[in-house]
Image (cartoon, rainbow, N blue to C red):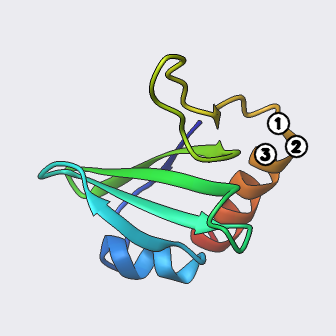
Amino acid sequence: MQISIQSPRENSVNLMRRVGYVFQKQVSDQEIAFIRSLGTSGFPRFHVYMKKIGNDFFLNIHLDQHKETYGKDTAHHGEYDPASTALSREIERIQSILLC
């Protein structure tokens, strides 16, 4: 699911900090990853990739249920369906804070 934020008045890190996310890594020149853990082990967690295009930010969000597995059965356990109750609530929460 993608959320767009047009002409924000804050930088990306401060904007995401305001909604409870922490910086995870710089993915590329224009893209940064942020996480918001829901459990003490770090999972499940919401994972946001934020891209800056012009003056706008675009957030791609998903829910990581648990750590990815590699080896014989490589799998990423992300939930991308916006119909998911947890993911849809998180999207609504972010939008209510950032798009006021």
**Mark 2 highlights which residue?**
85
Residue farthest along the front direction in this orientation:
72
**Secondary structure category for the residue under label 3:** helix
Callout 2 amino acid: Thr
Q: Are marks 2 and 3 in contact (CB under 8 Å)?
A: yes
What is the x, y in percent for residue 65? 70, 45
Which amino acid type is marked by label 1?
A: Ser
Identify the residue position indicated by label 3 in the image. 88
Q: Is residue 30 above or below residue 40?
A: above
Q: What residue would you read off at disc 1?
A: 84
Q: Quadrant of the N terminus?
A: top right
Residues marked 1 and 3 touching at CB (< 8 Å):
yes
Quadrant assignment, res 100 = bottom right
Q: Residues within 10 Å of mark 2 (few under 14, many from 20)?
A: few
Mark 1: secondary structure: loop
Q: Residue at x 40, y 57 (%)?
A: 6
**SS of the residue at dot 2?**
helix
Residue at the spot 58% in from the left edge and 46% down from the top edge: 67
The residue lying toward the viewer, choosing from 26 and 69, is 69
Give the CA separation, mark 1 to mark 2.
Answer: 4 Å
Q: Residues within 10 Å of mark 1 (few under 14, many from 20)?
A: few
Among all residues in the image, which is located at the extreme right?
A: 85
> In the picture provided, is 73 more to the left or to the right than 65?
left
Total numbered labels: 3
- Residue 54 placed where, x, y %? 19, 51
**In the image, what residue occupies the spot 74% across and 68% down?**
39
Which amino acid type is marked by label 3? Answer: Ser
User: Who's the residue at 64% across and 58% down the image?
Assistant: 45
Above or below, 93 against 11 in this view is above
Do tag 1 and tag 2 residues touch (Cβ < 8 Å)? Answer: yes
Residue 45 located left or right of residue 14 = right
Q: Position of residue 80 (x, y in %)?
A: 64, 32
